[in-house]
Amino acid sequence: MSIQAQEINELLHQYNRMSVPYITVQTLKMEYDQYIILDTRKKPEYEVSHLPGAIW
């Protein structure tokens, strides 16, 4: 695990009291139609590329 990923995991553990469920990329791939994907980037970035079916 990279240092950045480790730092993110530590921050998530510190601030998220498990109020938001997490899923893996593999789970998302297998159950893609069960989720709503919200893209929260700026509109120009979304327009360049986004996941199929993602909502801006």
Image (cartoon, rainbow, N blue to C red):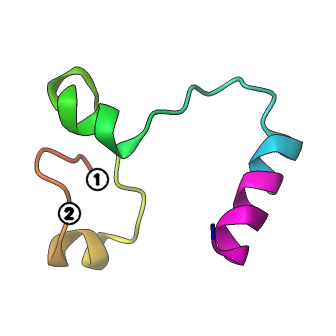
Q: Please give the range of residues in magenta.
A: 2-10
Q: Quadrant of residue 29?
A: top left
Eyeballing the image, is 50 above or below 45? above
| Quadrant in which the N terminus appears | bottom right
Element assignment for label 2: loop
Residue lying farthest to the front in this orientation: 1
Q: Position of residue 46 (x, y in %)?
A: 25, 68
Q: Please state which amino acid type lies under the numbered disc 1.
A: Trp
The residue tagged 2 is 50
Q: Is residue 14 magenta?
A: no
Q: Residues within 10 Å of mark 1 (few under 14, many from 20)?
A: few
At 77% from the left and 66% from the top, the residue drawn is: 7
**Position of residue 48 measured from the top left corner of the image (x, y, whole percent):** 17, 78
Whether residue 18 is situated above or below residue 9 in the rendered picture: above
Q: What residue appears at the point 45 percent right and 33 percent down from the top-left corner?
A: 23
**Residue at image x 34%, y 54%?**
39
Seen in the picture, residue 12 relative to 40 is either above or below; the reply is above
Is 14 on the left or on the right of 7, as rendered? right
Q: Main secondary structure of the magenta part?
A: helix
Q: Extreme right residue here?
A: 14
Image side of residue 48 versus residue 16, left or right: left
Q: Are marks 1 and 2 in contact (CB under 8 Å)?
A: yes
Choose top left, top right, bottom left or bottom right for residue 19. Answer: top right
- Residue carrying label 1: 56
Q: Residue at 54% of width from left, 33% of height from top? A: 22
